[in-house]
Amino acid sequence: MENSQYMDMFLDESHEHLQSLNDGLLSLEENGDAVAVVNEIFRNAHTLKGMSATMGFNKIAELTHEMEDVLDLIRKEQLQLNEDIIDTLFKCLDSLEQMIDNVGNGDPEDLVDVSDLVKKLSSISKGEPTPAAAPAAPAAGAAPVAPAAGGTLSPAALQLSDIDIDVLKQAKEGGLQGIHVRVTLSETCVLKSARSYMVMNALDELGDVVKSVPPAEDLEQEKFDHSFDLLLVTGFEIKAVEDALGSISEIDKVECEVVDPDAKIEAPAAPAPAAAPAAPAAPAAPAAAPAAPVAAKPAAKPAAKAAAPAQHKKPHQSQSVRVDIDKLDTLMNLMGELVINKVRLEQIGQTHRLAELTETLEQMDRVTTDLQNIVMKVRMVPVSAVFNRFPRMVRDVSKELNKEINLTIEGEETELDRTVIDEIGDPIMHLLRNSLDHGVEHPDDREAKGKPRTGEVGLIARHEGNNVVIMVTDDGAGIDPDKIRQVAIKKGVISEEEAMKLDDADAVRLIFLPGFSTAEKISDISGRGVGMDVVRSKIEALSGHVDVETHINEGSVFKIKLPLTLAIIQAMLVKVQEEMYAIPLGSIDSTINIQPTDIKTVQNKEVIVLRGEIIPIIRLEESFQVPHVRDANELFVVVVHAGETKAGIVVDNLIGQQEIVIKTLGKLFTGLKMFSGATVLGDGRVALILDVATMMQ
Amino acid sequence: MAKKDENKQEFESMQVVAFKLRDEEYGVSILNVQEIRNLTDITRVPFAQDYIKGVINLRGSVLPVIDLKQRLGLEDAPYTENTRIVTITEDDVHVGILVDAVTEVLNLTSKPVDAKKAINNKEGMRFLSGIGNIDGRLIVMLNLPEIIGLPQEGK
């Protein structure tokens, strides 16, 4: 296909648009019809339509076109949103996603039959009664909320709605002011949309453009004469605005005026009757009253929310660059080489005591550290890239299960390495489904227990030292350790004596063992017995760790701990006889120096006592069968932890802390779980990196 | 390498990197060979199969090294100044093989004899693909995929 060079871009962008459509619809469902959100999703649908039509995907274009019609009616408030419409729109998104995936796989788009959806949409947009929509639609459809354009007079030109005024009032409380900006482009201006975009961009630097007349998508399509009106909420004075716009060429005139929300309060009320001609069959003044609550109620909440996304999204689009992930990987590899060589140079400098070299190296060290940080940052992706598909999933699953669930997402701006992000989606999805299916009880059961009907499920990400912690919480039934013990014994995962020896916390951790699922009946949502152990192995493959904490009838917390990055880590280098090993600093608690006599035995197992704690020890020399060269008269113990358990690794010497670049051991060592990789040291030798969690098993 | 095809079709000449293990001469196709390196520090990898000598640093990446004599069941011999690591690529797997000395690059003009006919040793045989004869000088060709092997056991 001749368009194939644009295919990747099309696929990427379509997915982005679908994602924002999903987000938008969800927020509509929650908050009612906030105008800004409807506008946003309308724009998304519109762009998607344009893109797919350009690429020649007519089915996609057709479906999005029908969606657009429906959204347009909602936007113009001629159609009241109801559950039926939202469900239909969600279904459309699913079909669209499938079609786009098909297209991406080189299949024809029409593998998915959308004719039913198209029919349904067009019947919705024609106002044919869909079961639930019928009663609501006419009432709201007739009542215009926003006073329509009353003329060219400056204040009325902005068509301020109650929502806008609310935004202005909030802005005023926050010490900001609303400025009405009218920009008149010169008559000869050719690329009007480009100019208007530049204006928008310039204003975005100063504050938030909360409203534009004509609307932004019309500006993009040059559907305006030579002037347009904008409402800017900003902390700057008019002068600054005029200066900012003055630098853009082909602009004839910039007029600015401060808009005072308090003074405007009467303004929208007055033009309301006058708006009648604009909206056909709109009842006059009295009708404004029933309409008011519709607008006013959602206004208070969404207004703030609606303003926020607008301010986040716009600068983003203009300043980001798409880079192939392979290129970033190469960059990272080169960075790794550079770090290795830098360390090597440092060692040469130290060995030969070359002051000049050391000085230069210190400079270089600063530069490479900065460079490394930036390369790392470039690879970082906020976890929202994974998280934002979950609200939709939770909505669908909870409907399917007939449960009432409220999902709270926190810390979605927390950043993780791209490689980690790609892998954690499935495990988190699994944990979430688990919480929805087995954790949160049915509303009736919840009521019987004296809990609110709606279950709370949380998805929380945050930094913790050099790690990122992701938690999936629920306030559901919790996990009964006794039940776990019984199932584990029945399934032969552990013996009865072993089960009795475990304390409750450890018993609950049995769910992470292979072949374990407590779900009494297998459901679509989760559990076929391959659940938690898959989550665990996936997380551990990422050098992470997963744990669970639970209280019966209070809920459970699943905690995933992940390293920030998998490429470069801080590690402690240790020496055993003549061999060198690296232990990731993240799993080290402390290091101590002991005499051989400090090692005691308990039941034939060697332990040490550290601050009252008894810690089992692992002698690397023995377990790795290191060739014995000489006797050591003092020993060092590196106390490491994996989860809650601790162990002491006995080594001959501590070399020091160093930044190491992790290299895989390659296919030949696939079965070797004891090492998470290897690294090249400054002297060119290779040291193996211990996988502490595996060692302790 | 498509050695089977070569056996079937009319044999065209083939360049072979020849090296010594004790007193015998072995060879691999030059297309599999990346480079020949002097012996460097080899880091032992505990729990790995015993024929894997360890790993070395090959310009910043980590390369496993196979002790070929051990793999073929030959008697061990100490390293000498002629000891080399031949780095080879087979099916996207990179490994180094440890040899006593690299002799030369030879041009094999006649088809190697099928190893099964020539040698009556079951254990060693799966590692060999044929025997080349250059004016009475015998070059044992290695079956690289089998020598590299896939890891079956862990820990």
Image (spheres, coloured by chain):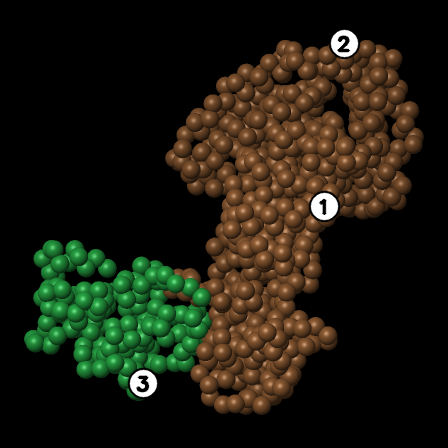
Chain colours: A brown, B green
The amino acid on which the numbered mark 2 sits, given as a three-letter code, is: Ala
| Residue labelled with disc 1 | A552
Dot 1 or dot 2, earlier in sequence: 2
Residue A87 position (above or below residue A106): above
Q: Label 1 neighbourhood size at 10 Å, few (<14), some (14-19), many (20+)? A: few
The amino acid on which the numbered mark 3 sits, given as a three-letter code, is: Tyr
Label 1's element? loop
Same chain letter for marks 1 and 3 = no
Q: Chain of mark 3?
A: B
| Residue labelled with disc 2 | A281
- Front in this rendered view, residue B12 or A531: A531
Label 2's element? loop
- C-alpha separation, residue under disc 3 versus residue under disc 2: 99 Å
Question: Residue A38: image x %, image y %?
Answer: 69, 28
Residue A669 position (above or below residue A408): below
| Residue labelled with disc 3 | B79
